[in-house]
Image (tube, rainbow, N blue to C red):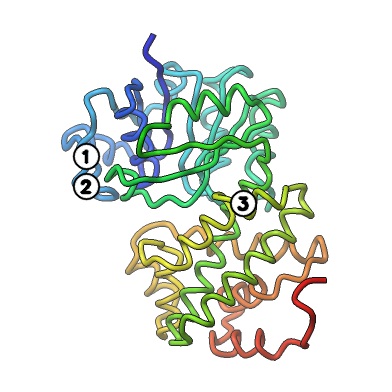
Amino acid sequence: MTAKISVLGAGSWGTALAILVARNGCQTLLWGHNSQHIETLKHDRENKHYLPDFAFPASLQVTSNLKDVAKFSDLLLISVPSHAFKSTLCQLKPFITSQSQIAWATKGFCVETGGLLNSVVTETLFETTPTAVLSGPTFAVEVAANLPTAITIASADLALANKLASLVHNPRFRAYTSTDIIGVQVGGAIKNVLAIAAGIVDGLGFGANTRAALITRGLHESICLGMQLGAQQETLMGLAGLGDLVLTCTDNKSRNRRFGLALGQGKNQLEAITAIGQEVEGICAAKEAYFLSKKHQIEMPIIEQTYKVLYENLDPRLAVQNLLAREQKAEVR
């Protein structure tokens, strides 16, 4: 029997994932909340707005009806922005059962609670809902272009992790499995904040030395928070942690990095967001990460200064000065 999968979220990443699994032989249904956009996708057979020049395989269909999505497959892969994650689950709940398998490629925290998305799934749907998260160093356009990519799929249910891995895995897309669902989520959320910070320092013209130091110390902050929340250090040193961090901090395909670059070059947030024209997940994640650091009394100076730039109008140059003026200490303690 041909495998079926529903992908929720018709932005660039959701579209790339839908194209990937459809190319792999799956019957695929892609859902988007904007019915006008979905009608355009049906007509064009590509996502000209978010992921142009990549034709939909014949086995990829689209819909704006959540009931159709739930009827189509028991495996649902969610790729909506983090701010829409909980509301999407609430709309989906009437159409699914406790046996429906929920996976997500969304990177961020729940904006309503500040918590990780796995908690949102079990609190909003059912405690027994099988869950998995897909994350790693991935730009949508490179996945759609069939360039070599590796990701991590984490789940407490190893059978579900292996099932999802088998659907996305091909000679150009390698899927590793893990049981560390917390670590994979923390890595995916924090890297967006650090990519904004990396963009800021590059926009200020501070050079490769500064960027390398920021990435390294930012990784340390991610590990500290992750381990406090129950993650494994090895996960945050892997694809979903260090791998994704390096990608988003160093390549201008990253929306978060481009946003930071614009701030460092003197643009305001509205100008930067308007120019990018898509979701910048690190903005919300910065607030949630900052509050988590305070709640758990974890020292996260890069996250803190990024938060102050975004939410307290701190001048980016002063933020860098604040980091450099911190008390001298041992690197590891």
Instruction: Give the SS element for disc 3.
Output: loop
Q: Is residue 272 left or right of residue 237?
A: left
- Name the amino acid, label 2: Lys
- Label for residue 80? none
Mark 2 vs mark 3, CA separation in Å: 29 Å
Residue pictured at 39% horizontal, 40% vertical: 14
Q: Is residue 76 left or right of residue 16?
A: right
Instruction: Give the SS element for disc 1.
Output: loop
Q: Nearer the viewer, residue 107 or 253?
A: 253
From this view, report whether residue 6 is shown above or below residue 276.
above
Residue bearing mark 2: 48
Q: Is residue 115 left or right of residue 32?
A: right
Relative image position of residue 135 (x, y in whole percent): 52, 45
Q: Quadrant of residue 119?
A: top right
Q: Nearer the viewer, residue 58 or 218?
A: 218
Q: How many marks?
A: 3
> The N terminus appears in which quarter of the rendering?
top left
Relative image position of residue 90 (x, y in whole percent): 57, 33
Mark 2 and mark 1 in contact? Answer it, CB < 8 Å. Answer: yes
Residue bearing mark 1: 46
Q: Residues within 10 Å of mark 1 (few under 14, many from 20)?
A: some
Please, which residue is most extreme toward the left here? 44
- Name the amino acid, label 1: Glu
Q: Residues within 10 Å of mark 2 (few under 14, many from 20)?
A: some
Residue bearing mark 3: 109
Q: Nearer the viewer, residue 265 or 231?
A: 231
Relative image position of residue 15 (x, y in whole percent): 34, 40
